[in-house]
């Protein structure tokens, strides 16, 4: 593992060098592995100081313990620890879930500390209403605030300011040093890499907005009202009850140049009161009021409106449009009712008897993981009060009681979190093995899998449930063991959150294809939006009995009522 981590640090350093962020020996990377969750000590790996980052090898990397003591020095002689090492440990101390910290010297980060205040007294930079904010786990209209430290002759002298900034800005994963560079961290090396790339982009955008356009990136843009959609003017004229030509035609007047009914017409632009379109201020959906004069189309709708329905949101076909199929589970391959009415209740009904056979050491780990889940929830969340008896006086009975209360409440509130999923997965495994549980799949799913196998289409699963839970469901399904049909599995741990566009880019990278080559099917609007933003080629809404009601967002995607609808040539 040590050799692998060292090699990874070398690759990251070389990558940042080629980005222009670590030239002239600048910058550094630290990765932490192990810890109580894995029942072993932490190990911290640190790139050396004063070495050209593009020429490093794994043997140049230091291995330390959590007391900053060198456990395994580099094989290359005369190397020095990075001056940032003290800062790495401050991040690991105050952000316990952090697994990777990156420091770069990009020109964008340096200029961002200077461009907005020539007096150099600015304590933070604020950025809002940029699409890339989603890349740092914020919404488009959220405000990103990155603290700025006053630089010192060496990084270790920044430690006091650095520690204050980490605690003052708990929602930010980055710190800027004036006239210096950027520090970013994440819960995995993948997340840290994604974050620093997005932070650099945002800082570059902010500087250019200010210097080139004179726009303050911290100020929201003026509110713009979207004009009513113009009507298509292609409906033919029709006769009124008196046999006369009705001259009204969706925002125009048809003017006859002859008394002869067969004479030609010319189209003269003119708004009429009979053609109305309203913007729904609540959800942005457009409601069209169709007048009596618009009854020439299907069910009284205009031909233009019907044609729009026919020509838009065509369902992609496999393998013509894609040879990579990525599927959600709940509401797509499997009934939501199975998960909510069978799997989740199975846990709450059997948790007490399950815990009876669990030894003290594992009970401690289970509770520790559940407490970590709770601490990630907002301060106002009702589950925060469940962090009880959090002391070192561990007793079997007390631990079982605490775990029972926490699990029942988290399941009741439908909280999806890593520690809870791990426990649920172990319990479900027991249920599947003894035959109590059998994974539900819709009857069309096995036929789709057979079709995909014949057409050389690779099928992957992406669910909020853990990979182990996915394999249990499909390995013990009502249609038998389906694992042989599935190429791979993704969950929130190995890919990221399903509502984050970066997760879909990561999946594409892990599969080894461009996002545009993937077809993704889900019943969740937010997931489809994120996939579309990531450039997934075909994004499809799954509509099954019992799925959540849809909003106008679903209108942006083709919808299917059976997975068989994507099977074609």
Image (cartoon, helix red, strand yellow):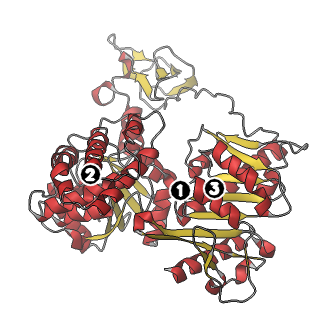
The spot of residue 355 in percent (x, y) is 21, 54
Tag in front: 2 or 1: 1
Which element carries disc 3, helix, strand or loop?
helix
The tag earlier along the polypeptide, 1 or 3, is 1
Say the numbered circle drawn on residue 96.
1
Tag in front: 1 or 3: 1
Say the numbered circle drawn on residue 332.
2
The spot of residue 144 in percent (x, y) is 65, 43
The tag earlier along the polypeptide, 2 or 1, is 1
Q: Decide: marks 2, 1 in contact (CB < 8 A)?
A: no
Q: Is residue 439 left or right of residue 222?
A: left
Residue at the disc numbered 3: 198
Q: CA distance from mark 1 to mark 3?
A: 22 Å
The residue at the far top in this view is 242
Residue at (16% x, 69% y) in the render: 481
The spot of residue 107 in percent (x, y) is 80, 60
Q: Which of 115 and 237 lies nearest the eye of the viewer?
A: 115
Residue 322 appears in the figure = yes
Q: Is residue 170 left or right of residue 119?
A: left
């Amino acid at each position: 593992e040590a050799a692998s981590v060292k090699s990874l640090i070398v690759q990251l350093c070389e990558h940042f060098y080629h980005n222009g962020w670590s030239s002239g020996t600048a910058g550094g990377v630290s990765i932490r592995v192990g810890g109580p969750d894995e029942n072993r000590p932490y190990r911290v790996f640190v790139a050396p100081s004063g070495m050209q980052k593009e020429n490093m090898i794994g043997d140049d990397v230091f291995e330390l313990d959590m007391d900053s003591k060198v456990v395994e020095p580099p094989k290359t002689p005369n190397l020095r620890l990075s001056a940032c090492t003290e800062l790495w440990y401050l991040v690991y101390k105050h952000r316990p879930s952090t697994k990777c910290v990156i420091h770069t010297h990009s020109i964008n980060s340096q200029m961002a500390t200077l461009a907005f205040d020539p007096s150099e007294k600015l304590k933070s930079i604020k950025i809002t209403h940029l699409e890339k904010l989603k890349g740092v786990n914020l919404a488009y209209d959220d405000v990103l605030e990155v603290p700025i430290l006053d630089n010192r002759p060496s990084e270790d002298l920044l430690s006091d300011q650095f520690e204050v900034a980490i605690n003052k800005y708990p929602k930010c994963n980055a710190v800027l040093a004036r006239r210096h560079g950027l520090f970013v961290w994440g819960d995995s090396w993948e997340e840290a890499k994604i974050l620093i790339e997005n932070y650099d982009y945002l800082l570059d955008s902010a500087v250019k907005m200010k210097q080139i356009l004179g726009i303050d990136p911290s100020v929201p843009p003026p509110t713009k009202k979207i004009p009513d959609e113009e009507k298509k003017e292609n409906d033919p004229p029709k006769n009124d009850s008196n046999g006369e030509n009705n001259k009204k035609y969706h925002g125009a007047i048809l003017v006859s140049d002859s008394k002869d009914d067969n004479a030609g017409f010319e189209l003269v632009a003119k708004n009429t009161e009979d053609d109305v379109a309203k913007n729904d201020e609540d959800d942005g959906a457009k409601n069209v009021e169709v007048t009596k004069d618009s009854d020439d189309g299907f069910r009284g709708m205009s031909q233009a409106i019907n044609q729009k329905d026919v020509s838009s949101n065509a369902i992609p076909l496999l393998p013509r449009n894609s040879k990579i199929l990525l599927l959600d589970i709940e509401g797509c391959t499997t009934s939501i009712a199975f998960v909510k009415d069978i799997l989740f209740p199975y846990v709450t009904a059997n948790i007490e008897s399950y815990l009876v056979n669990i030894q003290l050491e594992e009970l401690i780990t289970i509770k520790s993981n559940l407490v970590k889940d709770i601490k990630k929830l907002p301060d106002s969340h009702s589950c925060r009060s469940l962090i009880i008896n959090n002391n070192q006086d561990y007793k079997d009975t007390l631990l079982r009681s605490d775990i029972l209360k926490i699990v029942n409440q988290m399941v009741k509130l439908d909280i999806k979190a890593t520690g809870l999923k791990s426990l649920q997965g172990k319990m479900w495994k027991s249920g599947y093995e003894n035959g109590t549980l059998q994974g539900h799949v819709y009857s069309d799913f096995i036929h789709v899998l057979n079709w995909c196998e014949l057409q050389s289409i690779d099928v992957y699963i992406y669910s909020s449930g853990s990979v182990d839970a996915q394999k249990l469901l499909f390995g013990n399904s009502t249609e038998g063991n389906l694992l042989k049909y599935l190429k791979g599995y993704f969950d929130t741990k190995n890919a990221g959150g399903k509502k984050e566009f970066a997760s879909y880019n990561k999946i594409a990278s892990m599969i080894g294809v461009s996002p545009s080559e993937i077809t993704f099917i889900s019943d969740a609007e937010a997931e489809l939006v994120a996939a579309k933003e990531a450039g997934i080629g075909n994004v499809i809404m799954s509509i099954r009995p019992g799925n959540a009601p849809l909003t106008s967002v679903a209108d942006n995607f083709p919808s299917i009522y059976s997975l068989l609808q994507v099977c074609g040539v």
